[in-house]
Image (cartoon, grey):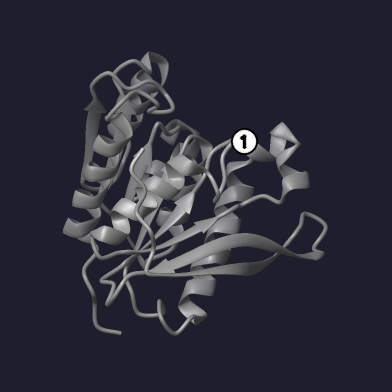
């Protein structure tokens, strides 16, 4: 797999709270290319995280396209051990909104339009967050579960790209059904030969290329 190194990368902690209201920090990595024209926040699915080689590869491709990236673990390692948390879309969406609030407070990203890149259950969280946060300008889902966003799909009015592997038949059908419920511009792109994790040769690179094109098209700087 080709790797693309960031120009400036920082390990950060994003403050949030647990279910009991106690403060905790989410681990994240912010990478900034020269003069970015947008920032893409990654919402990972189960069994993945900010250090995942797949996520970092896609993030590198996006940076080459002139986009900053924020890879954030929406659950702590202890929380992730509970499968209920992995499928708690409201919890994941709230954590993602917290990451967007952090971006708004960071000088280098405060005025940048925001894209969300979600995988698996993280895609549902990204769509729910997009339905609530007006700064989100576009969403890409890779092998995602948009169906888990439920009624929020109709309230998503930003452009959404659903990327699914041709061999991921069950998830492909769920994405086809969810497509009709989205409230704005949407597109389903099927990556030939790809299974759920896009592990087949060339399939992740194709997904990253399509995602970069989508974000380049829809993430444009707007007046503050």
Look at the image and tell me whether residue 135 can be seen.
yes
Callout 1 secondary element = loop
Q: Position of residue 49 (x, y in %)?
A: 57, 46
Looking at the image, residue 92 lies above or below residue 10: above
Question: Looking at this view, is 132 or 88 the one in front?
Answer: 88
Q: Is residue 223 above or below residue 39?
A: below
Is residue 102 positioned above or below 89 on the image?
below
Residue 198 at x, y = what percent? 38, 28
Give the residue number, with chain letter if any, for mark 1. Answer: 87
Viewport quadrant of the C terminus: bottom left
Please name whichever residue, 62 or 14, is drawn nearer the observer in this view of the structure. 62
Q: Position of residue 152 (x, y in %)?
A: 44, 45
Q: Relative to 127, is 203 on the left or the right?
A: left
- Viewer-side residue, 78 vs 172: 78
Q: Residues within 10 Å of mark 1 (few under 14, many from 20)?
A: some
Residue 46 x %, y %? 59, 35
Q: Residue at x 44, y 40 (%)?
A: 54
Q: Is residue 177 above or below residue 210?
A: above
Which is nearer the eye, 165 or 133?
Answer: 165
**In screen coordinates, is 138 left or right of 6?**
left
């Amino acid at each position: 797999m080709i790797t693309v190194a960031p120009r400036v990368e920082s390990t950060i902690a994003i403050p949030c709270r647990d279910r009991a209201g106690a403060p905790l920090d989410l681990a994240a990595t912010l990478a900034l290319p020269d003069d970015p024209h947008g920032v893409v926040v990654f919402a990972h699915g189960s069994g993945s995280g900010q250090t995942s080689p797949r996520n970092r590869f896609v993030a590198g491709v996006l940076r080459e396209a002139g986009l900053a990236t924020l890879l954030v673990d929406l659950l702590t390692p202890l929380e992730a051990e509970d499968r209920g948390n992995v499928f708690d879309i409201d919890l994941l969406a709230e954590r993602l909104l917290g990451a967007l609030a952090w971006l708004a407070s960071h000088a280098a990203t405060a005025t940048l339009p925001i894209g969300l890149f979600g995988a698996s259950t993280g895609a549902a969280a990204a769509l729910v967050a997009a339905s609530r946060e007006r700064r989100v300008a576009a969403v890409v889902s890779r092998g995602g579960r948009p169906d888990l966003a439920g009624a929020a799909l109709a309230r998503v009015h930003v452009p959404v790209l659903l990327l699914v592997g041709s061999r991921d038949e069950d998830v492909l059908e769920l994405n086809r059904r969810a497509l009709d419920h989205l409230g704005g511009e949407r597109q389903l792109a099927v990556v030939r030969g790809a299974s759920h994790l896009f592990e087949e040769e060339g399939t992740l690179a194709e997904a990253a290329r399509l995602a970069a094109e989508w974000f380049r098209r829809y993430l444009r700087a707007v007046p503050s």
